[in-house]
Each structure stands twice: as structure tokens, then as C-alpha cells.
Amino acid sequence: MNKKIVFVSGATSGIGKATSIKFGREGFSVVINGRRRDRLDELKSVLEDMGCSILSLPFDIMNRDEVQDAVKSMPEEWKHVDVLVNNAGLAVGMEHIDTGNPDDWDRMIDTNLKGLLWLTRALVPSMVKKGRGHIINLGSIAGKEIYENGNVYCATKHAVDALSRAMRIDLLKHGIKVTNVAPGLVETEFSMVRFKGDREKAALPYAGMKPLSGDDVADIIYYCATLPEHVNINDVVIMPAAQAGANHVVRKG
């Protein structure tokens, strides 16, 4: 297999799905990961219809043993990943710190932070061995600012921001690029997960404005990943034109 390989976690919806399709359309071989096997199978079919080489790995990124076993199970020709997109992440609940649900906190920390670490630890040694590679971490405007009721989610995304900078330093001598991509409002399943299926509440963040789409963010990820070898974008913040910060959004109607 001579094509470059991209590994996308959280590929079953939103930014991850859009990113997998973008890279597949542009000729990359794509490894897709997610917990929902049925959705992975659907995405696999879409990518195969495009003529893309595809490897589907259904596992839960929160489980370190599952991550390690899945990476070990990859055929040898797929193990030398060129671009790792650490996309899997979520927000659950939106309460003040004194009334927050510790189970929600665990889920965010285990996915947004630990899951990113487990997958990076499993895949990056092969990048180090060959002396090149690119890690793209999906951060958030929540990793740049704090907003009310965002406490633990914001903390995890601040950690992603810090880890991205730390990885860049640690891996510099090995020729590995690291990029932190921090989107603002993106209309995906994100809000439905945060509000635990309450459609009315989930629609409110996007009311009266045009948010980003998964495709918008996927285009930025692809751009960062395909720059010349001597160019690295360390950090990029992308927002809708109607947004200037976590708490600054112009809404019409």
C-alpha cells in the first residue's frame, strides 16, 4: 500500500465522518474508528464506493486495553500511520460545578483526555521510528476560553491544548508535526449528546445564526495535513462568521 494513511477516531458522525470522507476523496487510505459498528459499516461502504482503501476498527477509545488490542490487530501495512486525527470527544451535561454529575465528568475526562492519550501512545512510536508523521488534535474554543457551566468540558479541552503544545516539543526532533484545531460552534451531534437527547435544548446554541459544519472543519484539517513538509500549523481557531468568542455570537430572528 503506497498511499498515505490517515487514522480518524470518532469517525461515526460529525467532524470525524466528514474528515474521513475528505481524506478518502483526496486519495488517502483511511482507518476509521468509533464505538457504533453499524455506523462504521455505513461509512466503510461510502468510502469503498469512492474507491478508497479502508480499515474499520470498532472500539471504545475510553478503554486502554481495547485501544492497544485494536492497534496491535491492524495488518502490518496499515500500522505505519502518516496522519493521526484525534477527533473523538464529547461534552455531557451543562451544570454548575456544585451540581454536576461525576459520571458525566468521568465520561468527558476518559474520552477527551485519556482516550486521546491512549491512541496517541499506541500509534506514535511508529511515526518516531520512521522519522515523520502528523498528529492533529481536535480541541475547541472551550480550550481557549471558559464559559458558565462548561467547567469540566473546558478543563479537558484546555488539557488538549496544553498536550498539543507539549507533543510538539517532545516530538520535534523526530520530524513529527502537531496541530491543535479549535472550532467554535459546529452543528453536529455534539449538542444532542451534551443535552442528553433533548432536541429543543440542543438546537438553542445554533439558533439565529449559521454555525460551522463538519465539512468546514474537515477542510481545515485536510489543509493542515497537506502543507509542505517544512510547514506546520501549530494552532488554528475556526469559528462561524457570526461568532467572535465563546460568549460572543450575533443572532438574527
Image (cartoon, rainbow, N blue to C red):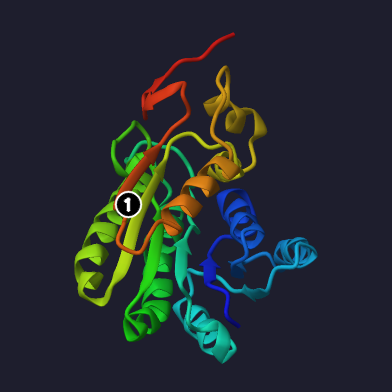
Q: Residue at x 58, y 44 (%)?
A: 214
91 shown above or below 65: above
Q: Secondary structure at mark 1?
A: loop
Residue 133 position within the rendered picture, expressed as x and y whole percent measured from the top left: 38, 72
Q: Residue at x 47, y 62 (%)?
A: 85
Quarter of image, res 40: bottom right
106 shown above or below 32: above
Can residue 32 be seen in this snapshot?
no
Q: Residue at x 53, y 68 (%)?
A: 6
Q: Is residue 107 left or right of residue 248?
A: right
Q: Total label count?
A: 1
Quarter of image, res 97: top left
Residue 242 position within the rendered picture, expressed as x and y whole percent measured from the top left: 46, 21
Residue that label 1 marks? 233
Q: Is residue 134 left or right of residue 40?
A: left
Task: Quadrant for the C terminus, please.
Answer: top right
Residue 45 position within the rendered picture, expressed as x and y whole percent measured from the top left: 78, 65
- Disc 1 packing (10 Å; few <14; some 14–19; many ≥20): some
Task: Identify residue type, mark 1.
Answer: Ile
Task: Quadrant for the N terminus, please.
Answer: bottom right
Q: Is residue 135 left or right of residue 208?
A: left
Residue 26 position within the rendered picture, expressed as x and y whole percent measured from the top left: 61, 59
83 shown above or below 213: below
Q: Residue at x 64, y 28 (%)?
A: 200
Q: Nearer the viewer, residue 118 or 99?
A: 118
66 shown above or below 225: below
Q: Is residue 93 left or right of residue 52?
A: left
Toward the top, the furthest residue is: 253
Can residue 44 be seen in this snapshot?
yes
Q: Nearer the viewer, residue 150 or 217?
A: 217
